[in-house]
Image (cartoon, rainbow, N blue to C red):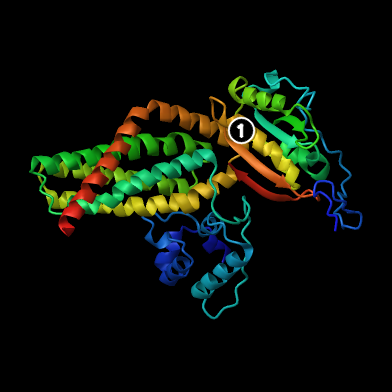
Amino acid sequence: MFEACPGSKMADLRTIDRQEDASGAKITSQLRQWPVQLHLVSPTAPYYQGADVLLTADCVAYAMGNFHSDYLRGKSLAIACPKLDSSQEIYYEKIKSWIEDARINTLTILVMQVPCCSGLLRLAQQAAQDSGRKVPIKYAVVGIQGEILKEEWL
Amino acid sequence: MEQYLSRGIKEVVTEHPKVGEVLSARGIACVTCGVGTCRLKDVVEVHGLSLEQERDLLTEIAAIIFPGREVEIPAIKRKIGIRQGELKYSPPMQTLVDEHSVIKRMLALIPGILEDLDVSAPEDRRTILAVVDFIRSYADKFHHAKEEDILFGLFEPDLEILKAMNDEHGIGRGHVRAVLAAIEKNDSEEIATRLLAYRELLTAHIRKEDEVLYPWMDEKLSVSQVGELFSRFAATDMQFREIAARQEAFVKELEEITKNKEELTNV
């Protein structure tokens, strides 16, 4: 029997009970820069210098309700899709440049639970390993309903 | 019950020794702590107990303090989450744990060093002085300096658990000063007493830090603070790299000597 790739397997989440925010307060964006796509950013842009950098898979911000307040706040961002994006050797060079040239403080990698997403972690780990400087790397896996399934320092 | 939660653990255990037994049964080693000023509610939070474990523990403690009375068990307001799964440290905290491993290797060698010690004999004297040099330069200047000057500085200075850890560092330094004084007097017995006391103190101290303090701190530190710690520890490593390498080599050498002695004894 044909099994869909877990990354594109259909899941209908419409029937899930959701806790609504009754206050109706506008949620402030924590984004501190533009652009955000990893192909478009310069790794040595001022907002990466000595920063806590958040590298997330594209889908993460859609799955996590509290993405801005829980993860983006205080960090500089880049997004990428390890499954669909091309020329990922450029990503490797940019991550390496964050560590060596922008001398970032930490790197946090957020990916979805689907297996193809782990490619982003492997890419970042390889770049970090090949860098002449070390930084703490935190890794978290997000479920398709936005829950944190795993979070640890590497 | 609320008022007991805000009292120092040593005070509570002294008043109700069975509370100490209840804590010990759960692997919470407050009874053997040399300081014991942490508040009962901090003890519950810092050990990362689940809500169920917290309630069970407080119910048992309440039964000891207020026998035969029905007491309302308050839920402790936590500043950090409940710990899950095995311990995994942040990178800077892992370096402290790794340094503890080197110190523990030295502590393990102390009883063998003290066997038939005659500090008036040049070789024994040299060994004891080298052990003191290890404690002072590696455990104290290099490792404890990282803790006291850098790590603890990221937390409120009046936290009881930090005061307790600093007090234990102070007690350890007192033992080392006493060892140096005893070397001057050629008093092998006093050297042995003080080094064994130091060994006992540090063994319990390291266990508390590895299993309780560091995981608790890791939960409280922001990602940015972890990065800051990592950089500052790296700078300290660079500053002390020769001392650290020399002392790690000394522990290895002492282990080799001890191993050879044991092999000769067994022949």
Which residue shows up at 73% across the image and 46% down it? A115
Placement of the N terminus of chain B among the 4 image quadrants:
bottom right
Q: Secondary structure at mark 1?
A: helix
User: Viewer-proximal residue, A14 or A96?
Assistant: A96
Residue B51: x %, y % from top left? 63, 63
When asked about the image quadrant of residue B127, the answer is top left
Q: Please identify the residue farthest to the front as the structure is shown.
A: A1
Indicate whether A124 appears above or below B265. above
- Using residue B231 as the reference point, say whether residue B126 is left or right of it: left
- Using residue A144 as the reference point, say whether residue B35 is left or right of it: left
Indicate whether B227 appears above or below B166. above
One can see residue A97 in this view = yes
Residue A148: x %, y % from top left? 72, 49
The amino acid type, in three-letter code, at marker 1 is Gln
Residue B201: x %, y % from top left? 33, 52
Which residue shows up at 16% across the image and 51% down it? B190
Which residue shows up at 18% across the image and 51% down it? B261
- Using residue B252 as the reference point, say whether residue B188 is left or right of it: left
Chain identity of mark 1: A
Which residue shows up at 36% across the image and 55% down it? B34
Indicate whether A60 appears above or below B85. above
Indicate whether A52 appears above or below B62. above
User: Viewer-proximal residue, A114 or B241?
Assistant: A114
Q: Please identify the residue farthest to the left as the structure is shown.
A: B120
Q: Please identify the residue farthest to the bottom as the structure is shown.
A: B68
- Using residue B14 as the reference point, say whether residue B215 is left or right of it: right
Q: Please identify the residue farthest to the right as the structure is shown.
A: A14
| Crowd rating for badge 1 (residues with CA inside 10 Å; few <14, some 14–19, many 20+) | some
Identify the residue under disc 1. A126
When asked about the image quadrant of residue B84, the answer is bottom right
One can see residue A74 in this view = no
Residue A110: x %, y % from top left? 71, 40
